[in-house]
Each structure stands twice: as structure tokens, then as C-alpha cells.
Amino acid sequence: MGGDKLIERHHLESCLIRAGFLQHETSESKTPG
């Protein structure tokens, strides 16, 4: 059970990190210069 929770947490963290990168990239492309 503990292992599954760790994997789930890691998956959520990776998803958040990916979303952050996507938001950062989109905001950068939107801003001129």
C-alpha cells in the first residue's frame, strides 16, 4: 500500500511539473521579446 501511494504521488508531481513547464513555455511565447 505504501509503495502504491509513493508511485501515485510521484505521478502527480511529474504531472504538476509538466503543467508548470507548459504554462511557462506558453507565457514565454505569448510575451514579446
Image (cartoon, rainbow, N blue to C red):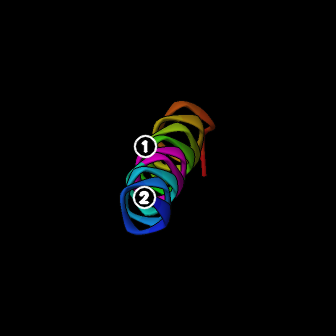
Query: Percent position (x, y) of residue 24?
Result: 57, 48
Q: Quadrant of the N terminus?
A: bottom left
Q: Observer-nearest residue: 30 or 13? A: 13
The count of marks equals 2
Q: Is residue 15 magenta?
A: yes
Q: Residue at x 53, y 30 (%)?
A: 30
Does 27 sit left or right of 8 as displayed?
right
Q: Residue at x 63, y 37 (%)?
A: 31
Does 18 sit left or right of 28 as displayed?
left
Which residue bears the numbered disc 2?
A: 14
Q: Observer-nearest residue: 19 or 33? A: 19
Q: Which residues are magenta?
A: 12-16
Instruction: Decide: is 21 above or below 30.
Output: below
CB atoms of marks 2 and 1 within 8 Å: no
Q: Which mark is residue 13?
A: none
Judged from the image, the secondary structure of the residue bearing numbered disc 2 is helix
Q: CA distance from mark 2 to mark 1?
A: 12 Å
Q: Which mark is residue 22?
A: 1
Q: Residue at x 48, y 54 (%)?
A: 5
Residue closest to the far top: 30
